């Protein structure tokens, strides 16, 4: 994977290996590697094949330094993490007001797969839970299902800097068993919240959830948002600058489903999790974090991922509302090395 084009990048990568921040991440990885709480998701049959020991942590800074430890190249399905980014594309396609007329931005306090709509307006509550995400997927423009999927994959490429594939067995597994999601789609069709392209939109939703990513991609997705929508390594803009705040604010209030309040309180970073075991967390103006560990808690969030983000938040004062100066200066830790920019 590494692309050591010249001596300078080789030197910087060696520095990175020995940087204090890299050592910190290695210690964090060791600290939580043995934590075996939680369970791999099995309601989508194909996801039950995940190995509990898989674990990776990646941090990408706003200036494009990459720090990784553990299984950061291991591919898994993005699942609900896709929802935040597809929401961004829907905003670009239709603007804030139209999107908001179809999907609200209120936390549900209920499980991610709850069959519930806002009684007053019949809108799904927010784009980060299944109902809202299906309504959001419905808004993605394109001539047909293939074109719409192509647009999603191109968007993810802008964020991560590399091509993405679909895990077809996971897609088919979800398509074959996703009756609950199908029920939500029909309920929303009844209330005029989604169009008649129900099957095409459900396929698109199942496909977006089946996109293959690794922990490094998750950190890059978050770092791009942290950097105002521009990928810090490739320099490419992934999302219109004006919608970055929309995406990360809804991540903060709704990204961890019915654990969003506790997450905001303890970790204080806009984030999004998925039942594949990933978490992507944004520290606006600073960095992005990607974690991967498929052992999930009862709410569908990665147990090790939560711990890692909580430690990073506390140790470096990264909580969004930490107005006191942090004990450790993150920049100083990172200054020990330049990271490996091997994209
Ligand atoms: N929380 C998740 O990651 C859920 C996504 C999954 N594809 C579903 O629809 O059930």
Image (cartoon, rainbow, N blue to C red):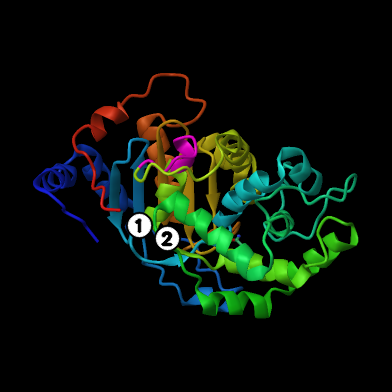
Residue at the disc numbered 1: 56
Give the quarter of the figure containing the N terminus. bottom left
2 or 1: tag closer to the N-terminus: 1
Residue 191 x/y as whole percent? 89, 57
Viewer-closest of 253 and 246? 246
Quadrant of the rendered image holding ligand 1 = bottom right
Residue 109 drawn at (x, y percent): 71, 47
Question: Do callouts 2 and 1 mark residues in contact (Cβ within 8 Å)?
Answer: yes
Q: Which structural element holds mark 1?
A: strand
Q: Is residue 13 left or right of residue 101?
A: left
User: In x, y percent, where is residue 155?
Assistant: 52, 54
Tell me which residue sits at (59%, 49%) in the image: 84
Q: Quadrant of residue 209?
A: bottom right
Q: Is residue 338 left or right of residue 188?
A: left
Q: How crowded is the residue under tag 2: few (<14 C-alpha within 10 Å), some, or many (20+)?
A: many
Question: Which residue matches tag 2?
Answer: 293
Above or below, 236 relative to 166: above
Q: Residue at x 51, y 64 (%)?
A: 276
Distance (Cα) linking label 2 and label 1: 7 Å
Q: In the displayed orientation, state which residue is furthest to the top.
A: 324
Quick check: is the Cβ at mark 1 less than 8 Å away from ligand 1? no
Over which residues does the magenta segment extend? 224-232
């Amino acid at each position: 994977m590494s692309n050591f084009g010249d001596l300078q990048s080789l030197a910087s990568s060696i520095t990175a290996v020995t940087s204090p921040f890299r050592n910190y991440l290695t210690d964090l990885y060791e600290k939580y590697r043995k934590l075996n709480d939680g369970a791999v998701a099995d309601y989508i049959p194909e996801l039950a094949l995940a190995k509990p020991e898989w674990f990776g942590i990646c941090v990408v800074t706003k200036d494009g330094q990459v720090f990784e430890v553990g299984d950061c190249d291991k591919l898994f399905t993005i699942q609900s993490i896709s929802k935040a980014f597809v929401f961004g594309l829907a905003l670009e396609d239709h603007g804030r007001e139209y999107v908001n007329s179809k999907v609200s931005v209120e936390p549900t306090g209920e499980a991610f797969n709850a069959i519930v709509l806002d009684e007053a307006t019949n809108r799904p509550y927010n784009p980060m839970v299944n109902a809202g995400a299906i309504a959001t997927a419905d808004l993605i423009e394109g001539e047909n299902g293939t074109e719409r999927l192509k647009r999603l994959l191109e968007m993810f490429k802008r964020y991560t800097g590399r091509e993405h594939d679909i895990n077809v067995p996971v897609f088919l597994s979800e398509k074959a068993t996703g009756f609950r999601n199908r029920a939500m789609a029909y309920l929303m069709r009844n209330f005029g919240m989604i169009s008649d392209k129900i099957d095409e939109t459900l396929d698109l939703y199942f496909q977006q959830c089946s996109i293959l990513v690794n922990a490094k991609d998750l950190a890059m997705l978050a770092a791009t948002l942290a950097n105002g929508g521009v990928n810090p390594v490739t320099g490419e803009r992934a999302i219109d600058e004006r919608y970055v705040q929309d995406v990360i604010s809804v991540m903060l209030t709704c990204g961890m489903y019915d654990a969003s309040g506790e997450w905001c309180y303890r970790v204080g970073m806009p984030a999004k999790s998925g039942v594949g075991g990933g978490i992507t967390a944004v520290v606006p103006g600073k960095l992005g974090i990607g974690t991967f560990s498929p052992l999930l808690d009862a709410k569908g969030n990665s147990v090790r991922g939560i711990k890692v983000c909580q430690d990073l938040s506390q140790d470096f004062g990264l909580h969004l509302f930490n107005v006191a100066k942090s004990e450790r200066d993150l920049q100083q830790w990172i200054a020990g090395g330049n990271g490996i920019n091997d994209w």
